[in-house]
Image (cartoon, rainbow, N blue to C red):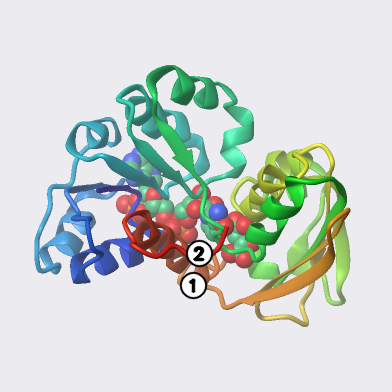
Amino acid sequence: MAIAGLGAVGKVIARELDKGIPGLALAAVSARNVARATDFVQQLSHAVPVVALEELAGLADIVVECAPPELLPRIALPVLQAGKKLVVLSVGALLAHPGLRETAIEYGGSILVPTGALIGLDAVAAAAEGTIHSVRMTTRKPLRGLAGAPYLEENGIDVASITTPTRIFSGTAREAARGFPANLNVSVALSLAGIGPDRTMLEVWADPTVTRNTHRIEVDADTASFNMTIENIPSENPKTGLITARSAVALLRKLSAPLKVGT
Ligand SMILES: NC(=O)C1=CN([C@@H]2O[C@H](COP(=O)(O)OP(=O)(O)OC[C@H]3O[C@@H](n4cnc5c(N)ncnc54)[C@H](OP(=O)(O)O)[C@@H]3O)[C@@H](O)[C@H]2O)C=CC1
Ligand SMILES: O=C([O-])CC(=O)C(=O)O
């Protein structure tokens, strides 16, 4: 196992691997700040090397990508070309690089997307086996959870000046991935589990009354209608909910579990 990116998500995964996940052992990590990453890995019970992103594939059978989205191809290509497993957290970036799917097919690799900061992808995937009529998602974020999104700059939106809940975006998951590359991975994961990025509709609210990144999904299908809400406690990175890393750890644990629960 190797981890690309040692931020809010990567550090939690590294610590959990260090505590022990059956069938998996941490072999290497990659980060931008090598000195800080070296300090971190030395605190683990089994220190591992800090290497360049491109080297991870040679050192592990599974690589977890939890780095800034623009690095996805650099991390993903060597892993998939080696026919290995890539766990992707920067899900939004998958839409900009559709060739990665073809690479996985060509070389026998696979891309695994955990539910991450969202909820209910088991039910969405089950409903997608039949006919889903519509998928809608509404995200409410505290202002700190939206800072830095290109969509805000392009549209002259100054979130810091917002004092009442304000809808700042309405569109498809594909449009959201372009406008909010570090804030709305969840909408892309939802779309990939269900009816795709062009039919999955999303509203984003900048909401100074909430302290948690809150996502509500509403699905109407021929087998069921359901709606669910998750209120994510922010991690050390205000854009990233605490549950995100836990979701990746749960996926890793499931890989070799003798009893696998959930779709
Ligand atoms: N799928 C989902 O539900 C969710 C996905 N995400 C996504 O997951 C990803 C990780 O999130 P998070 O952990 O909060 O992000 P952070 O910003 O906390 O961490 C990013 C890490 O990437 C490292 N990094 C940056 N540049 C490089 C480089 N050139 N080589 C190696 N490592 C590098 C940084 O290193 P350093 O520490 O040295 O600067 C940092 O450790 C993001 O893309 C985020 O949008 C987030 C939440 C939910
Ligand atoms: O989807 C994302 O990138 C992050 C997010 O909304 C959350 O953690 O709640």
Inspect this view and state whether residue 223 appears. Answer: yes
Q: Give the amino acid at mark 1.
A: Ser
Residue drawn at x 18%, y 37% is 59
Quarter of the image holding residue 138?
A: bottom right
Ligand 1 within 8 angstroms of badge 1 C-beta: yes
Q: Position of residue 192 (x, y in %)?
A: 67, 43
**Between 18 and 123, the one nearer to me in the picture:** 123
Residue 227 vs residue 69: left or right? right
**Between 124 and 141, the one nearer to me in the picture:** 124
Q: Give the amino acid at mark 2.
A: Thr
Q: Residues within 10 Å of mark 1 (few under 14, many from 20)?
A: some
Quarter of the image holding residue 142?
A: bottom right
Find numbered disc 2 in the image and state the secondary structure of the residue it sits on. Answer: helix
Q: Which mark is residue 244?
A: 2
Mark sitting earlier along the chain (2/1): 1
User: What residue would you read off at disc 1?
Assistant: 235
